[in-house]
Structures are given as C-alpha cells and as structure tokens.
Image (cartoon, rainbow, N blue to C red):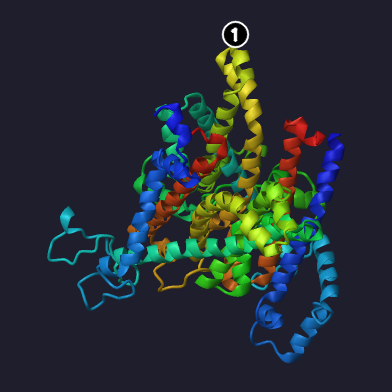
Amino acid sequence: MDAESISLESVSLWRITWRRLFRRKSSIVGLIIILILIFIALTAQWIAPYDPLQVLIGLEDVKMREAPCVHLFGCPTEKPQHILGIDGNVRDQFSRLLYGTRLSLMVGFSTVTFSIAVGTVLGALSGYLGGWVDNTIMRVMDVLLAFPSLLLAIAIVTVLGPGLINALLAIGIVSIPAYARVVRASVLSVREMDYVSATRALGGNLFEILFQRIMPNALTPLIVQGTLGIATAILDAAALSFLGLGAQPPTPEWGSMLGSERNQVFTAPHLVFFPGLAIMITVLAFNLLGDGLRDALDPRLAQGG
Amino acid sequence: MMLQYIIRRVLASIPTLIGILIVTFALARLIPGDPCRAMLGEKATQATCDRFMREKGLDKPILEQFVIYMGEIARGDFGTSLRFSQPVTRILAERMPTTVELSFSALFISLIVGIPLGILSAVRHNSWVDVVTMVWANIGVSMPVFWLGLMLAYVFSIFFKDTLLWLPPSGRLTAGIADDPFYEVWQLNLAKDSFALAFSDFISRMNILNALLTANWKLLVDAIRHLILPAVALGTIPMALVARMTRSAMLEVLGQDYIRTARAKGARRPAVIFKHAFRNAQLPLVTVIGLSLGSLLGGAVLTETIFGLSGVGRILYDAITARDYAIIQAFTVVIAVFFVILNLIVDISYAYIDPRIRLN
C-alpha cells in the first residue's frame, strides 16, 4: 500500500485495536478459549452426559470416587463411561465440571460489572470534583488497598456469612479501588481540556460532562483492567469456595469441588486435578486476552494499523 | 533529604492505619447476631451476657468503644480466643514465625528463579528461552495456589515415593527431630516473661534460623525438606510476576542510548547487563515485590491449610470454621498493618534506588 492511500483511509480505533490484538498468538489463544468456555457454559445442559446433582447410587454400577472410565482408552464397554470419574458423592465429575463453567464465568462477569460500576462512579466524582470529595474517596480506597485482597474478602464474607452471593460481593468490594483509580486518573487528565470547559460553559450538567464528555477517555484502561479483573475474580472466588466460604455444596463450583475432595488427593487425585486445571485454564485465558488488549490499546505502541 | 522523605511517607500512612482500624472495628461490630452469644456460646444466660457486655464495654457509645478498641490494640491486647481460651496475642506470637519463614522462603525462591529468567529472556529476546519463560510465567500467574499445592504434594509424596526426590506432604518437621531453641543451647538465662525471651522464642520458632544458630544440620535439612513444597507453591505467582517484570524492565532499559554507549566504549557484555542495565531495571521490580508480599500473606492461608503448617494462615482458616471472631479480627488488623509497613519500606527503598523520587 503506498503512502497516499494510507493517509486517505480512515481507520477507527477499534479496528486498529482488533488488528493489533490478532497479531499476537497469545491473545488469539485466550480469545478462543474464552469463546469455547462461553459455548460450554451456554450449552451445559445439552452436552453434559448427566445431571450435575444426580447421585448415581442404584442407577449405575459405579463406586464412590471411581477413577475415570473412557471407552476409547480401554475401559470395558459394559461399564458406563465417566470420562473424569466419579466424585465423593457418586456424581459424574465431568458433568459437574461442565456446569462449573457457567458459575465461574458468571462469577467473573458479575463481580467485575459490580466493581466497574461502583469504581467508575467513585473515581469519576473523585477526579472531577477534587477537594475534600477526592480526598475522602481516595483515602477510603487506600484503606481497602491496604489489605491483602483475599484476606479482606475473607473478613467480609465472615461478616456477611458464607455463600456464593456474599463471596461475590466481597470480591467485588475488594476490587473497587483498582477501577476507581483508573477512572480518576483518566478524568484528571482531561478535566481541564477545552472541550470539557466548553461543555461546562454551555451549561452542561455534571452527568453530561462526566459520562458523555469525560468517560469515553477512561474506556480503554477500564476494558483492560476489567478483563484482567475477571481473571483475578475467578481465582479469588475459587479460593473462597475452596475454604468453604463461597459456593456451598452441592453446587458444582470448581473451587468447592476441589475443596471438598482435597483430603482425598492421595487416593483420588483426578477429583482434585481436573477442577484445578479448569480454574487455571479459565484464568489463563482472561489473563492472555487482558495482556493482549493492554498492548493493543497502548498508544505508545501505536505504529500504524 | 532522605530523612525528610521518610518522615513525610510515615506521616502519610497514618490515615491509612486509622482507616484499617475503623474497617476492622466496623467489621467486628457488623457481625450478625448477639456478640455475647457469638463469643460465649448459645447457652449463655442473660445475666452472664449483661456482665460480658459491661466488661467488654459493649454497652458504651460506639465512639467510646472505638477509642477503647484503639487503646487495646496499641497495648497489643486482642482479647481472648474463644476456641483456644488463650490470649490472641500469644497465639499470634507463636504462629507468626511459621508464616514469616514460609513467606520469606517463597519470596526467596521467586527472586532467585524469577530474576535470572527475566534477565535471560530479555537478553535473548524472542529466543526459545524467552518464549518458554513467558508461556510459563503466564501459566504461573493464573495458577490457583491451593491446586498447585495439592498437586505438588501428590507428585512428590506419592509419585516419587521411595526415591531421593520424595518430599514430606505436610508438617514442619519429622517427629522426633531435636529442635532445641538456640537460647537453651547457648544456655542464655533469660528472665521469664521478659521481652528478650519472647523475642528469642519468636526467632527460635523459625526452624531454619534456629538450626543455623545452633549448628543443628539434621534439623536444617529436615526443615528445608518440609518447606520446599509449600514455599514453591506459594512462590509460584510472585515468581512469574518477577520474571515478567524483570523482562519488560530490562527490555526497556536495554533499548536506551546509554547502553549502546556502554557497549560502544567496549564494556564487557555481562558488565553492561548487570551494572548498567539491571541496576536501572530494579525499580519496577521493587514494586512487584511489594505487591507480591500482599498476595503471599493471602496465599499463606491457602498454603498452610494444605500443608498442615500451624502458621497464622492455618489458624485463620480454623478460626473461620469455628467463627472465632477475636482471632479473625486480630489477624486482619495485624496483617493489614504489616502490609502497610511493608509498602512503606518499598516506597522508601524506591526513593533510595532512584534519587529523582525523593527530590520531587
């Protein structure tokens, strides 16, 4: 392509980002894994061979914590196929794992949505209004950041009582400061720009200035932070469930599946291995995509499309 | 100039510390249900409860309660644990050394592996070393600590059973190994209830340190063998972060003009890498270490639970299951304050490494 046609072609930021994102193999891998996980989550009830809560005692000839039986790998065909084995309550581990995808993605998206919503409002007000509002909000954020995140989440869940919703709330609260800071920084960087002053002079109200004029600038760092935040949220939620503070049995949640079988790791390692692997792959996918997005959206790396 | 900076940073962290106290105080008061019955059990009578409320000052106005609470914490009094019927401060002093030893070993492993890998992959940018390191680092930051711990325990105690690679899956020491504290071996006559004894006891509870002080090699080997798996499990995330950060910081520095100048004037390659480049790549590294310490403390809860180590994290887990609020509250305060102090140290060392920061 010659120089003239490049200058004539107008390319939107999103298209450039998209193109740069796909130049990295790791972000493609991340995106593909996420798409597969979303597919599994949406179709779990059709692709799972069993009901995740169904206890198979009396229905099939299987024993508690039986090792995986895959017909393709030499397991006798007269035995029912359970490709990831049977769990401690005689349920099909594979089906539970598939349903767990639903919960993990839900955990990631819902906590991040919550913390972005709260963090954005706090950060925007803080950056735009300045003064004591800014001071108060940011000191509170500093205090939240002063706790190791998992520990604060544990303390909050202890107060609220164990359970998935409370665990989500705790993780959401713990991650608010990260978003508040990102938004505040973006607001500060454009607050005094002419186009914002112009809106102000034209009598635009606070809402209009903040969310229509200023906030679009905070969008890119928020997307990056949010994608990486999903990874952290899934990991923390799994840890809380592992400790018995998050999803409660018999809910098919990866962390709690792993936690309830952790004492059996020496006798039935498959019950610990697969849920953990699922957590790792999911977290990895969001980390890869988040890193890719950060590089793709970084204006310092902007060298053409 | 440096002193001024330190004083300014210390003063700036005071509001955060007060905030931490407010948060933990609020969390403790927000616990649903009657605090008396939560502490004394369901069967406590009304009379006992009234007396309990009076003794604990829970019938006083909330502001006064907060002042009392601050006073108690300043005196190191965290109340009594319901489950262990012992002062929480004592439990803390007994358990803290295990966690400190574990966290520092994890940090140590993450640095001695992470930094060289990071430097290597920056120097050999885009080579297979770089690619492998980065793939591995990405997996490392995505690793659930509790899963890795369990898998390591399985592999090294079942898979490598009866080989030299066998490692114990739980505990801190093999039963029967002599671990006399150094102050007894040295025959120091420390007064009972003295600070010197309490401090020496704290030190002696860190097995590796105690083994070195008493030249007890059997204890040293045994303690290290028990510590390897938990430390690797806990150290993996920081290790990956350190490798990643070292690499990106080195890549940025290596591309600068003064590096080319150094090479042009004929400086040897290792000298350029370590003296010119790495020194300037330390700054982001210090930040990562500071941030990792927080995740180490959080991860200690999971690691200690898995490996049966009786540290602060393990007891926090037990306290959660037993609803032992005094312990949960005390540990949250102590670890948060510890974390603030660590961040303070990180900030100060930042200024020490880079003079531009303290001048601003």
The residue sitting at 68% across, 52% down in the picture is A187
Of residues B147 and B99, the one drawn nearer to the viewer in this rendering: B147
Q: Quadrant of residue B187?
A: top right
Q: Quadrant of residue A273?
A: bottom left
Crowd rating for badge 1 (residues with CA inside 10 Å; few <14, some 14–19, many 20+): few
Of residues A1 and A192, the one drawn nearer to the viewer in this rendering: A1
* Secondary structure category for the residue under label 1: loop
Mark 1 falls within which chain? Answer: B
Q: Tell me: B272 left or right of A64.
A: right
Q: Tell me: A58 left or right of A155.
A: left
Vertical comparison of B160 with A201: above or below: above
Residue placed furthest toward the bottom = B46
Q: Is residue B226 visible?
A: yes
Vertical comparison of B104 with B130: above or below: below
Q: Is residue B94 visible?
A: no
Of residues A66 and A234, the one drawn nearer to the viewer in this rendering: A234
**Residue of label 1:** B266
**Where is residue A202 shown, x and y percent of the image?**
72, 59
The residue sitting at 55% across, 47% down in the picture is B177
**Where is residue A123 shown, x and y percent of the image?**
68, 57
Q: Quadrant of residue B24?
A: bottom right
Quadrant position of the N terminus of chain A in the picture: top left
**Where is residue B208 shown, x and y percent of the image?**
61, 42
Of residues A31 and A219, the one drawn nearer to the viewer in this rendering: A219
Q: Tell me: A115 left or right of A108.
A: right
Please name the amino acid that badge 1 sits on.
Answer: Gly
Residue placed furthest toward the top = B266
